[in-house]
Amino acid sequence: MPNCPEFALHCPLPVVDHEVVQMAHGGGGRLMQQLLERIFFRAFDDPALGERHDGARLEVGGVRLAFTTDSYVVRPLFFPGGDIGSLAVNGTVNDLAMCGARPRWLSAGFIIEEGLPIETLERVAASMRVAAAAAGVALVTGDTKVVDKGKGDGLFINTAGIGVIEHERVITPRSVRPGDAVLVSGEPTGNIAIMSVREGLEFEGAITSDCAPLHGLVQALLGGGVAVHCLRDLTRGGLAAALNEIAGRAGELHHGKAVLAEETVLGVRFSGWTRCMCANEGRLVAFVAAEDAARALALVRGRPEGAGAALIGGVGGEAPGLVTLESVIGVKRVLDLLSGEQLPRIC
Amino acid sequence: MPNCPEFALHCPLPVVDHEVVQMAHGGGGRLMQQLLERIFFRAFDDPALGERHDGARLEVGGVRLAFTTDSYVVRPLFFPGGDIGSLAVNGTVNDLAMCGARPRWLSAGFIIEEGLPIETLERVAASMRVAAAAAGVALVTGDTKVVDKGKGDGLFINTAGIGVIEHERVITPRSVRPGDAVLVSGEPTGNIAIMSVREGLEFEGAITSDCAPLHGLVQALLGGGVAVHCLRDLTRGGLAAALNEIAGRAGELHHGKAVLAEETVLGVRFSGWTRCMCANEGRLVAFVAAEDAARALALVRGRPEGAGAALIGGVGGEAPGLVTLESVIGVKRVLDLLSGEQLPRIC
């Protein structure tokens, strides 16, 4: 963890050995991007991977599919508003939705540490069943492995998912155009809820994780005829990472003020991140054609999981690849990726 | 580990707490089956999962797909003839092939322990690239997570895969018929190779893992018009587990003598397993119509990875669900699942 949390963005990184993997390599910030570029994008030079999207778009026999995977290593396994099981289902459902696909089938791989109570597995499996039913997906194949005590951390879950793309739009960072409106579906609270359990923190308001499926919002936008250009859920690295990753392939994003509930703001300020770094698994950012912005907002707000939605900015053309943040008093600054670790093990 | 290795099958289990997960729950034997039945098959009551096959068969828009997943937790990460990366590619390629599908796309999820040398990741990614190219699959989507030092074991990899089923056959345990011939593609050596590195064992012969893709054998059988009823790769639990799982859904299997290289036999006897429990990731068992048996054998032997193939028995009808083993002097005994753990962390 950076040692001056109130100004984490401006801290020098601690002295670290860059030849071994560090926690920050998993945090969704710059180090993770560097690791991906250095190792994985270089080794697997596939066009689908090159899209840097939440999933791959595939085509076979005239059928368009989305395919995605995520491993879940969250601690603790159970937290206010969710658990590793619901997170593993919703996370992959959401990545498929971000490709504009209707989520259909999931796989689940369980890596279990010797000594885990079987009752814990039962609770997690039950939670996954409920989450899958709510999202309308079927868990069709799976795998279990057991590792020696001390060689795991209770339970890790990997889910992969297949969705079907039932429209003609190409929803990807490359489709973003100058002038596009930027919409977020609500304020993120997820990792604050998890941290509050892990670190014994208490807040005056009740904070629960916003772990929830997002495919309903996406279907509402697409069904409503909105010209959706790009979608991203606000997981590791939060809005800052999402906007920077998309901007890096799209153009400048100029965005204003996000709507955040007071108790969440307090939580975020307490731990020294800007609100834009806050990650969760129940919020998305959408890039839509400017002329559809008002209709998109109404469609998203019309659903319970999008009640707190807001238009937060637009895509400019002056400084391609940069994300600028305008404060309430009009000061602009560059919104960068977090350099080191955010809050590890939140997803 | 059982404390009398020469007679592991007949040992009473050590006294264990059945309310927590044990290493044996991951070994591919009876305890793993019980865990799957108790937790996962109960929670996820899906017809595709109910097939108890190596993957799920799906259909969308007239296209037939296979979908599968496996996590790889092998120790050590590098072993004679392979490494965790080639294993993760070939294992999932093989599971797709066992569904009769042509493997097409893979996902990869990396769970990295803090402190892993980045050079190790580079070697593993390079190995995956080579294995994927050899198997004709594209790695199209991925994920990385980092866990704290002491909460993982260097590197775990999950791969999921999608294959396309390009024929009309239904290759599944339910398709097995009395009279079917049983063919194995060669002798298994995989876990002996891994153990020889891990435990510092030495053998007179050179033992390497038979980690290899099997889809070429499957395409040869299908392309040659063989009536293939069921396929299974000989991973956790080996031939004994494969035959028992299939027999539990098919009828009696009566099989004779497998072909095993002398040096492997020595390795197996040394550690007290029967040769039928030996797992690997480069051998398959095929159930084919009796009239196609000789042709199937010729087709499989015609490929380098099937040069050691043999017909080892047939499907009878006298004692449904039981697998019987006939020794060279004609003594029959029931070939059961291993009760406890085989060799953990070999895949």
Image (cartoon, coloured by chain):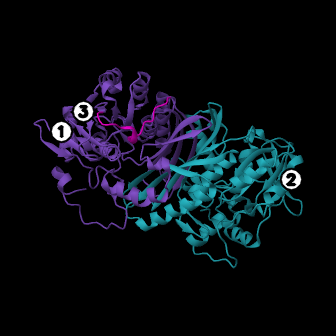
Chain colours: A purple, B cyan
Q: State which quadrant residue A326 falls in.
A: top left
Q: CA distance from mark 2 to mark 1?
A: 73 Å
Relative placement, left or right, of A215 versus B43 is left
Q: CA distance from mark 1 to mark 3?
A: 20 Å
The x, y position of residue A221, in whole percent, is 39, 25
Which residues, given as a range, are shown in magenta?
Answer: A167-179
Q: Which mark is residue A312?
A: 3
Q: Chain of mark 2?
A: B
Provide the residue designation for mark 1: A266
Q: Chain of mark 1?
A: A
Residue at x 42% of width, y 58% of height: B112
Residue type of the residue flagged with mark 2: Arg
Residue type of the residue flagged with mark 1: Leu
Most foreground residue, B114 or B81: B81
Residue type of the residue flagged with mark 3: Ile
| Residue B273 sits inside the magenta stretch | no
Q: Residue placed farthest to the bottom in the image?
A: B204
**Quarter of the image where the C terminus of chain A is located:** top left
Q: Which mark is residue B347?
A: none
Q: In the picture shown, does residue B53 fall above or below B118?
A: above
| Residue A175 sits inside the magenta stretch | yes
Provide the residue designation for mark 2: B295
Q: Residue placed farthest to the left in the image?
A: A329
- Earlier sequence position, callout 1 versus callout 3: 1
The x, y position of residue A244, in whole percent, is 30, 46
Magenta part mainly helix, strand or loop? loop
Q: CA distance from mark 3 to mark 2?
A: 67 Å
Relative placement, left or right, of B42 versus B314 is left
Most foreground residue, B297 or B2: B297
